[in-house]
Image: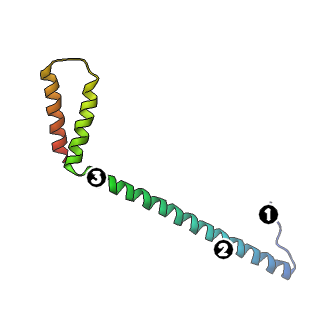
Amino acid sequence: MIPRIPADPVERAERKANLLLASEVMRGQAALAVDDLGQRADGWVNRVRAWRSLLSNPWVAAAAGTGAAFFAGAGQKRRGQLWRGLRWAWLAWRIWRRR
């Protein structure tokens, strides 16, 4: 419940000063929270940029694609050399096209 506004001018001035001080403290805390959030977002953006620049290298993309294809094909049973070769060719084509 919100207390009533006092009738005494001294109490009213004190209440006004307290409210202004509370408002200033809340604005300061909000500014600190926004600054902290901005710094965290900047950190994530820098990480994403670093990964993008690393993965934009065609050699890294080819190595990652080759490794992924190796692990994907390693667990499969023999289905014939032709199909395996076609899968590798398709993967190489997709990696090359993505570059």
**In the image, which is nearer the foreground, mark 3 or mark 1?**
3
Distance between the alpha carbons at the discs numbered 2 and 1: 20 Å
Q: Is residue 42 above or below residue 28?
A: above
Instruction: Identify the mark nearer the N-term, 3 or 1.
Output: 1
Location of residue 72 in the rendering, given as x and y in whole percent from the top left corner: 27, 29
**How many labels, in total?**
3
Location of residue 28 in the rendering, given as x and y in whole percent from the top left corner: 62, 71
Q: Residue at x 16, y 44 (%)?
A: 97
Amino acid carrying label 3: it is Leu
Distance between the alpha carbons at the discs numbered 2 and 3: 45 Å
Mark 3 burial class by Cα count in 10 Å: few <14, some 14-19, many 20+:
few
Q: Is residue 35 above or below residue 97?
A: below
Q: Is residue 59 above or below residue 9?
A: above
Which numbered disc covers residue 2?
A: 1
Location of residue 52 in the rendering, given as x and y in whole percent from the top left corner: 30, 53
Q: For mark 2, what is the residue?
A: 24
Q: Are marks 2 and 1 in contact (CB under 8 Å)?
A: no
Q: Are marks 2 and 3 in contact (CB under 8 Å)?
A: no
Amino acid carrying label 1: it is Ile
Q: Residue at x 22, y 51 (%)?
A: 57
**Helix, strand or loop status at disc 3:** helix
Location of residue 89 in the rendering, given as x and y in whole percent from the top left corner: 14, 33
